[in-house]
Image (cartoon, helix red, strand yellow):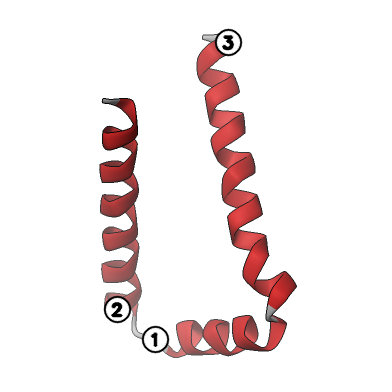
Amino acid sequence: MQELLHSLLVGFSLLLIVEGVLPFLKPNLWREMMVRAIASSDKNLRVLGAVSMFLGLTLLLLARS
């Protein structure tokens, strides 16, 4: 159980690092992307979220094998 919590903490930490790179390096580009995301339809955001989850799951399965 402790190993699972450690893995989740590492994964969450890496997520925060990756999410922070663009606003740190290119804040104007990040702001533009957020404005476009807000203007997008729910359907487009759901598709993007589904594709993102599928790619993440695929990479996770590849990494674990």
Helix, strand or loop at mark 3: helix
Q: Nearer the viewer, residue 64 or 56?
A: 64
Give the residue pinned by disc 2. Answer: 44
Mark 2 or mark 3: which is in front?
Answer: 3
Q: Residue at x 59, y 56 (%)?
A: 18
Q: Nearer the viewer, residue 32 or 24?
A: 24
Q: Which mark is residue 2?
A: 3
User: Within the image, what quadrant is residue 5 found in?
Assistant: top right
Q: Is residue 60 above or below residue 25?
A: above
Q: Residue at x 63, y 71 (%)?
A: 22
Q: Residue at x 58, y 90 (%)?
A: 32
In x, y percent, where is residue 4?
50, 18
User: Within the image, what quadrant is residue 11 found in?
Assistant: top right
Q: Where is the C terminus found, in terms of image quarters?
A: top left
In x, y percent, where is residue 64?
32, 26
Amino acid type shown at disc 3: Gln
Left/right placement of residue 58 relative to residue 41 reads left
Left/right placement of residue 2 relative to residue 50 reads right
Mark 3, other Cα within 10 Å: few <14 / some 14–19 / many ≥20: few
Measure the alpha-carbon separation of dots 2 and 3.
38 Å
Amino acid type shown at disc 1: Ser
Q: Residue at x 60, y 60 (%)?
A: 19
Q: Are marks 2 and 1 in contact (CB under 8 Å)?
A: yes
In x, y percent, where is residue 51?
27, 61
Measure the alpha-carbon separation of dots 3 and 1.
40 Å
Give the residue pinned by disc 1. Answer: 40
